[in-house]
Amino acid sequence: MVATAIASNNEVNSARNAAERYGVKSRPDLSYTPAVARETAHLYERVKHHIPAIEWPVHAPYIHAINRLKAERGAVILAHNYQTPEIFHCVADIVGDSLQLAREATKVDAEIIVQCGVHFMAETSKLLNPEKTVLIPDMRAGCSLSESITGADVRLLRERYPGVPVVTYVNTSADVKAETDICCTSSNAVAVVESLASDTVLCIPDEYLALNVAKQTKKTILTWKGHCEVHERFTAEELNAYREADPSIEIIAHPECHPDVIAVADYAGSTSGMINYVKDKKPARALLVTECSMASNIQSEVPEVDFVKPCNLCPHMKRITLPKILDSLLEMREEVLVDPAIASRARLAVERMVALSQ
């Protein structure tokens, strides 16, 4: 279950007011009509290599309805790189990794943000846009890293290591961020650690990210045993087997993987870093050591690259579906709220990260 801060009375009233202000829309006709086929044909071109033609009539009416309702609501949809292709390519306005979405959340003019990702991402958008309505299509979309640590745990760590700054991965709850000096993502973790004056840094909760950061800095890195349930499944033995089968394959790994996995990879970086590496290098064959939907999402931009897909799926990301996005916009749910007392402190840690990354 996702741990959510108890909302204040003002926040509850805000959620009710939002629902009343925007109103519940009547359900659209979800028939696959010639008009729907015509108006979504250009979107199918983006995903035709991943969605069979026989399945498109199931997706197209939802995509058509979501895009029309999104415009009526004045909403913007943010989607993580791990979302399925029909979401990533057909209804999202902004796509990217955690850092990209955090940055873009501060720039959007829309009053409604629909976060197609997991709960901590929606919380981060709310922290950076406290006056806006932030929705997540499924409140149960959690994260094993986020659930591995609590704010109380961080307070105990501060007692154990007095004076040691705390760098917290953005994959955490607002409650944890509130106890943090500065947040980081996989793309800027080393830069964040290096920005601190202390020779010792707590880098939590992802143990493997912290260990991989430790190899790139002279600072002493203290860790926490949190892991991503997708990335921890990959092993060096598995990747070596792929390389033995095809020595020309390029292995591109996410730093949430075990250091042994990173050691055998040709490149390691955030999801955006992995994407840029593939676009720049255009290897003949590439193995992305991360959630497997990402390879499908970037295939259209680099059709010459043959992707090998060891298919580890994130069950939390896959809770977000087209029908749930449509329901979220129709009924203005599920709204993400953060207790103001927690939000003010958590926001500071995120804003420090965003400012450093800029």
Image (cartoon, grey):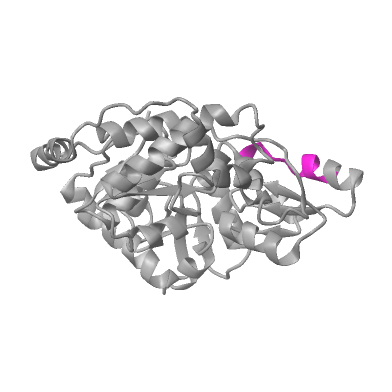
Q: How many marks?
A: 0
Q: Position of residue 208 (x, y in %)?
A: 58, 49
Choose top left, top right, bottom left or bottom right for residue 175.
top left
Image quarter in which the C terminus is found: bottom left
Picture coordinates of residue 231 (x, y %)?
Answer: 61, 42
Q: Could you tell me which quadrant the N terminus lies in?
A: top left
Residue at left offset 50%, top offset 54%: 97
Residue 146 image offset from top left, x and y in percent: 42, 41
Q: Is residue 114 left or right of residue 230?
A: left
Report if residue 239 lies within the magenta region: yes
- The residue sitting at the front extreme is 34
Magenta stretch in the rendered image: 232-240
Could one spot residue 180 in this view of the protein? yes
In-front residue for pair 271/158? 271
- From the viewer's perspective, tell me whether residue 71 is left or right of residue 224: left
Q: Is residue 196 above or below residue 250?
A: below
Is residue 254 shown left or right of residue 144? Answer: right
Query: Which of the pair 184/139 is nearer the observer?
Result: 139
- Observer able to see residue 3: no
Reply yes or no: does residue 22 show up in magenta. Answer: no
Residue 238 in the image: state x and y as whole percent. Answer: 78, 39
Q: Residue at x 26, y 31 (%)?
A: 331
Q: Is residue 184 above or below residue 87?
A: below
Q: State whether the magenta stretch is mostly helix, strand or loop.
A: helix
72 vs 154, nearest the viewer: 72
Look at 43% across and 56% down and name the residue there.
Answer: 101
Q: Residue at x 38, y 66 (%)?
A: 354
